Image (spheres, rainbow, N blue to C red):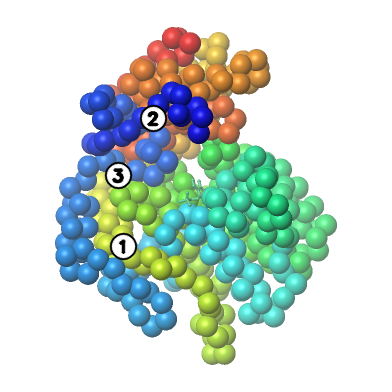
Amino acid sequence: MAAVESAGELVIDRGEGIYVWDEQGRRYLDATASLWYCNVGYGREEIAEAVAEQIRRLAAYSTFGDVSNRPAIELAERVGALAPVPESKVFLTSGGSDSIDTAAKMTRRYWQLVGQTDRTLFITRESAYHGMHIAGTSLAGIEANAVGYGTLVGDVAKVAWDSPSALSEAIAFAGPDHVAAFFCEPVLGAGGVFAPPEGYLQEVRAICREAGVLFVADEVITGFGRVGDWFASSRWDLEPDLITCAKGITSGYLPMGAVIAAPWVAEPFWQEGAGLWRHGYTYAGHATVAAAGLANLDIMEREALPGRALALERELSEALATLAEHPLVEEVRAGTGVLAAVQLDTDAIAAEPGLPARAVAACREAGVLTRALATGALQVSPALVLDRAGMKELRTGIGAALDAL
Ligand SMILES: Cc1ncc(COP(=O)(O)O)c(C=O)c1O
């Protein structure tokens, strides 16, 4: 707060494609698509039209009990059809943290419903980010995000982010009959953009299946095209029990999230005698937000943006690769869709903790808007409509910023 007070704030005023402008009229290439979400790029007229039309007709109506609205139904069906597991059910939320909270409750509730009431433990990966509600804070693998709040949700174990055997050991230690779910952020995002080691995701998926542990893929960043497929779970063929998502579902034009449940997870909730599941959010299934989501998915499908992200992944990693030669850069992590990070030298950060903030400021000076992730890496996750010229501009801007330091 004090830093912002002394340095002033950057007020973003408008956006078009991969660019945003501040209130002084300065243009920036938005290297982060805001907080990893503006997948279709800014300024899409057809989303604005869809939103305006829906607001005039019916801005919103609740989706509690047996009540619903058409855009919410259509969006749930559309997302269900895109889901990697056929016949999946979709629970709409208001964002990623809602989705995580919902998935945490849904997994424990599932085990209650099927009579395995001891299955309460959640396992999560170190360095993972699962949002800011209490469940997500409790699951946080980024330690700094979880400390300072007293007792959080109990029954959480954390395992090394890159080790399938660490997961096996944690399950064996707790006893498989006590483990409810493994929350897996397929590519660690806020933790610094770390792609899974080769084979990791398939292995941890198999370990969960073997132990009867529910596998929850947290695809809040990776969902809706960013990693070169509709979901990381589709790309790596994970057949998850649950997917949590948000961001790209509307490209952030309006806030929404979702939990996608495989039919076998949903089934006990539908059974005669299962009772009411007392869970839901006022704005879940908000009609106007759903209309924005539908228009957003129209664009993603028409422009084949998940495929475009896949096609861009090599070009992006080649474009950024030479930055690794810069003395202030330790490595460039790229090669998974339109998702990358330029890791600043950790010794240099240790010597000057303010270095990442200075690098971010220098990037702004050079016309590139980015931010520093947990490890002191610069986030690169622009809109999926990025083109060659944009990629070059991104590379040149970050390079110039580093030189200026
Ligand atoms: C992997 C992951 N999970 C959950 C969340 C929380 O989403 P939200 O900020 O929409 O609540 C985020 C947000 O960045 C995320 O990256």
Are the residues at dot 1 and dot 3 in contact (C-beta closer than 8 Å)? no
- Element type where label 2 sits in the image: loop
Residue 20, quarter of picture: top left
Q: Earlier in the sequence, mark 1 or mark 2?
A: 2
How dense is the environment of label 2, judged by Cα within 10 Å: few (below 14), some, or many (20 and up)?
A: few
* Badge 3 element: loop
Q: Amino acid at mark 3?
A: Val
Residue 200 or residue 127, whichever sits in front: 127
Name the amino acid type tagged 2.
Answer: Glu
| Amino acid type, callout 1 | Ala
Frontmost residue, 63 versus 73:
63
Label 1 CA crowd tier, 10 Å (few <14, some 14–19, many 20+): many
Residue 240 seen? no
Work out whether mark 1 precedes mark 3 in sequence or the reverse, and give the earlier one: 3
Label 1 and label 2: CA atoms lie apart by 32 Å
Q: Which residue is mark 3?
A: 40
Residue at image position (55%, 50%) is: 132
Q: What residue sits right under mark 1 in the picture?
A: 290
Nearer the observer: mark 2 or 3; the answer is 2
Is there CB contact under 8 Å for labels 2 and 3?
Answer: no
